[in-house]
Image (tube, coloured by chain):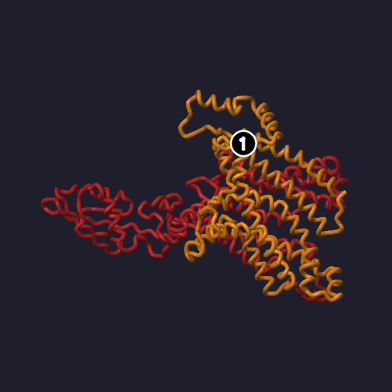
Amino acid sequence: MTTIPFDQAPEEGAAIQGRSLWADARRRLLANRAAVVSMVILAVVALMALLGPWLSPHHYDQVYRSYIRVAPSFQPYPHGDAVTAMVDRALRRSGGTVEELTVDGDTMRLVLTGEEALDPRIVRSIDRSGDFRGAEVVETSEDGRRMVIEATLERYTFLFGTDSNGRDLMTRVLYGGRISLMIGLLATFVSLVIGVTYGATAGYLGGRADNLMMRFVDILYSIPFMFFVILLMVFFGRNIFLMFIAVGAIEWLDMARIVRGQTLSIKRKEFIEAALAAGVGTPKIIRRHIVPNALGPVVVYMTLMVPKVILLESFLSFLGLGVQEPMTSWGVLIADGANNMVAAPWMLLFPAVFLAVTLFCLNFIGDGLRDALDPKDR
Amino acid sequence: MLSYTVRRLFSAIPTLFIIVTLAFFMIRLAPGGPFDLERPLPEQILQNLRAIYHLDEPLIVQYGLYLKSLLAGNLGPSFVYRDFTVAELIANGLPVSIQFGGTALLVALVLGSFLGSIAALRQNTRTDYTIMGGAMVGITIPNFVTAPLLSLLLGVYLGWLPAGGWGEGAIENKILPIVTLALPQLAIIARLTRGSMIEVLRSNHIRTARAKGLPERVVIFRHGLRAALPPVVSYLGPATAALLTGSVVIETIFGVPGVGRYFVQGALNRDYTLVMGTVVLIATFIVIFNLLVDLIYGFLDPKVRYD
């Protein structure tokens, strides 16, 4: 526990500035080193997920057939004599044989000979391979059986390597992060709206309505909910937007309980009485007076729920029930990586590290917020 | 206590009924059916099949039929694994799942409560921070990440254990799945134990035990741990039910022939009876273990009375 030093005694005559509950909580949160570091890291991850796929030179579903499962590297591909194989592949049906192949920087120079006269349209098949561009015939011998072709090598950098379809893993990890984070936030938002409305209404109405509403929540609690998420996914045909709603619709139970508990104590306060005396209607009292005052624990619970939802989404995607190809999420990438871990361990490591770091940060922030807002500690 | 148990079991019936009903209608209303194959079956065969399984009758009649056979203790035939009944599939897989889940649970309980107690005794020291940091890792990282990572590290790189596969149930094939199953539970149990142990250590009966000169070991593990365990036990109810009924992820990754994968497979194949069978199984386990938890409470805490 960290102790917060008292402010210096106010100078003579200076007005004493009160600190609001939220300002207090903010100070406490900023004093928690783990939470602050987590917030920074999370912001970086979120920014990368948001801007990364957009800034990356590769599209998340672009397939590079010549670069299947290549290892992560700072050096642009192709490496070493991989060019030979590429030329062979590009010329597979052209009938010429490679006599000489030189690579100088980005330029590839190729001397080609054939049994018969070579067709200059050969350059098109070189271009079409996707590994070269701007191929042109520089020199042709008189009988046309020998040809010198120059082309520019396409150089690609795959910082995280590529996956088993030859797609850039970095772009996919960042894109997957975008989906995972978005699902986390959206599902949490859905459960927030349902849970807060339900809990505040039940708590404020009280009596038989409250009893009935909370009884219903109790029944839903006893249902093995993971199974129902899976059933919902099967039912909804794996549409990710419906998945947000399905997950949110199931996760609202705790939220409703928390908000109801808060509401029960808030509704006895004088300002509610004042609002009633002023003739404010029930919906407006709930909206304007109850909900804003119950937000503290809700915020804490919300931060702890985002990682839970991300985890759930990853789990479903891991089972093949969530996000579908070519779209991706961390769960999909991890499942893919687990299948290829012996041949291509980077396919497992990168998404796993991103997921783990994000979950860590969210948990630390949630814990920090709880400590900051928890009145027991005061 | 016997009447309490009987009463609890009776009060579980409506819950089970609601769960069964919900699951039945949800899986039935899902698009597709168990006989939708890549190559559609001829119309006549399809009709015959549907007639055999009563799929051609109105849904509400089928629901009645299912409830009737359920009451008779019959879970019905599997639609996809044609040679087996659902009861047989469960009977084959459940012992494996129970063995794995039970071992993992035991490991998690013993190590978790031990580490949690240590952390509580050394509160706010480096030992405490290390244990709690480790617990945070265990809780945060999901098992579908730890399972492949551990098998990559211990199986592929170090070559100590087989990286996957079942190997007809050889011991070394069982270690990794049990460890991955146990890790998150261990972490949660350690955290819960630490939390309640810290409170217990400040209580009067511990002071008394120390004052009469009991050795520290007895004070901590007999008097302290016993009082600190109720929160752990109440967590363990649903957790045990979930562990014993298998884990989809672990069974998929390590090829363990348990019951955990049946639910997902069943839901995907629209194997209606298999899905319902697993739902009934899980719900029953949850009811039983919640009851067991409440009974164990009585042994741990003499203040609890059943009336």
Q: Nearer the viewer, residue B254 or A64?
A: B254
Colour displayed for chain B in the image of the structure: orange
Q: Secondary structure at mark 1?
A: helix
Residue B144 falls in image quadrant: bottom right
Residue at the spot of label 1: B273
Q: Residues within 10 Å of mark 1 (few under 14, many from 20)?
A: many
Q: Is residue B233 visible?
A: yes
Q: Nearer the viewer, residue A153 or A238?
A: A238
Quadrant of the rendering where the C terminus of chain A is positioned: bottom right
Report whether A304 appears left or right of A338. Answer: right
Which residue is at the far left? Answer: A142
Q: Position of residue A271 (x, y in %)?
A: 85, 52
Count of labels shown?
A: 1
Q: The numbered mark 1 sits on a residue in which chain?
A: B
Q: Position of residue A214 (x, y in %)?
A: 79, 44
Q: Is residue B278 above or below residue B161?
A: above
Q: Position of residue B267 (x, y in %)?
A: 58, 40
Report whether A208 appears left or right of A355. Answer: right
Quadrant of the rendering where the N terminus of chain A is positioned: bottom right
Q: Nearer the viewer, residue B226 or B36?
A: B226
Which residue is at the far top? Answer: B44
Report whether B222 appears left or right of A123. Answer: right
Q: Is residue B146 visible?
A: no
Colour displayed for chain A in the image of the structure: red
Q: Position of residue B306 (x, y in %)?
A: 86, 50
Q: Is residue A370 above or below residue A292?
A: below
Q: Is residue B48 above or below residue B245?
A: above
Residue drawn at the location 62% of the way across and 47% of the way down: B94
Q: Amino acid at mark 1?
A: Thr
